[in-house]
Amino acid sequence: MSSYIYENSNSKSFFNMACISFVLSVVAMIFALSFLEISTAMAVFVGVCYVFSISSCFTLAKVVRDRHEAEKFLSKVESAKTEKFLSEQPV
């Protein structure tokens, strides 16, 4: 069976754009919260909700990626088992 190789289809510029947009969104949220005319407790609550939303997005993306990679790996294992079985059969 061949070794498992991670296939990355994202370009370096796409990765950089994702990192920059993430940093900009966090900075914009902090900037907006600092200028809102609301109580400190309300600003902290909104900030905590924002952080929770970001962490939930990361977790969901990881779970979806892990499931996809597991399905690809299991498919490769099943294919290898089938090929081995077929090669062992007399002609």
Image: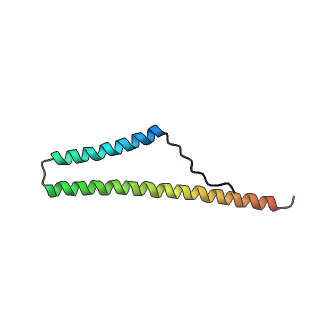
Residue extending furthest toward the right: 91
Q: Is residue 12 above or below residue 64?
A: above
Q: Residue at x 26, y 43 (%)?
A: 28
Q: Position of residue 76 (x, y in %)?
A: 65, 56
Residue extending furthest toward the top: 13
Q: 17 left or right of 42? A: right
Coloration mode: rainbow
Q: Residue at x 38, y 54 (%)?
A: 57
**Which quadrant, please, contains the C terminus?**
bottom right
Q: Nearer the viewer, residue 91 or 19?
A: 19
Question: How many badges with numbers are in the image?
Answer: 0
Q: Position of residue 63 (x, y in %)?
A: 46, 58
Q: 27 left or right of 5? A: left
**Which quadrant, please, contains the N terminus?**
bottom right
Q: Residue at x 67, y 60 (%)?
A: 78
Q: Position of residue 50 (x, y in %)?
A: 28, 53
Q: Nearer the viewer, residue 76 or 34?
A: 34
Q: Is residue 32 above or below residue 74?
A: above
Q: 49 left or right of 8? A: left
Determine the image quadrant of residue 77: bottom right
Determine the image quadrant of residue 69: bottom right
Q: Is residue 71 above or below residue 31?
A: below
Q: Position of residue 46 (x, y in %)?
A: 22, 54
Determine the image quadrant of residue 53: bottom left
Q: Nearer the viewer, residue 75 or 7?
A: 7
